[in-house]
Amino acid sequence: MQVRSTTASDLDAVHRLLSTHGWSHRLGTVEDLGRLISASQRALVAVEDGEIVGFARAITDGISNGYLSMVVVAQPFRRRGIGHALVEGLVGSDPNITWVLRAGREGAAEFFAKLGFSASTTAMERLRR
C-alpha cells in the first residue's frame, strides 16, 4: 500500500470512493471535489494494487492549528492500517500543532483515540444551515 498526495487524475476515483462510503451529501460534482481538495493544505490517497482505497484531507496553518476533515477507507480495506497511515501522513510529527476533528460517525471516536486524539470539552461549533 502506498500513501501519496492526491493529484488531479485521482478525482474521479476519490469521488467514487467518497460517494460509496457515505459522503455524497458533502461532495457535489467531481469539479466541486477538485475545488475542495485545492482549498485544503493537505490531501492524501492510499493506493493498493493501482486502486484508490483511502482518502484523507486536512486544513492547517502548519504552525499551530489543524483540522482533520475527512478520513475514508473503502470497507473491504479497513483494519489494515490504511486509515492510520493516512492520518499520520496528514498530521505529521510536529508536537506544536493542535489537531481537531469531528468524530460523529460510528466507530470514529474509538479509531481516533487509538491515534492519540481525545475528547475535548473546549470545542464549539457553528453548524451549517
Image (spheres, grey):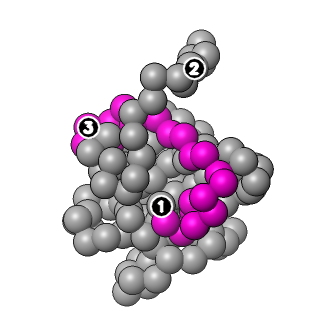
Percent across and percent down for residue 96 are 66, 54
Which of label 2 and label 3 is nearer to you? 2
User: Which amino acid type corresponds to the residue marked 2 in the rendered image?
Assistant: Glu
Q: What residue sits 45% from the left and 23% below the top?
A: 121
The N terminus, quarter of image: bottom left
Q: What residue sits 65% from the left and 51% below the top?
A: 97
Nearest to N terminus: mark 1 or mark 2: 1
Residue designated by label 3: 106
Is residue 37 in view? no
Percent across and percent down for residue 73 are 36, 60
Relative to residue 37, is residue 14 drawn left or right? left
Residue designated by label 2: 125
User: Which amino acid type corresponds to the residue marked 1 in the rendered image?
Assistant: Val
Percent across and percent down for residue 89 are 54, 69
Mark 1 surroundings within 10 Å by alpha-carbon count, few (fewer than 14), some (14 through 19), many (20 or more): many
The C terminus, quarter of image: top right
Residue 65 colored in magenta in the image: no
CA distance for labels 1 and 3: 17 Å
| Disc 3, SS | loop
Kindly identify which numbered label has been placed on residue 87.
1
Residues in magenta?
Answer: 88-108
**98 to 84, vertically: above or below:** above
Q: Residue furthest front?
A: 95
| Disc 1, SS | helix
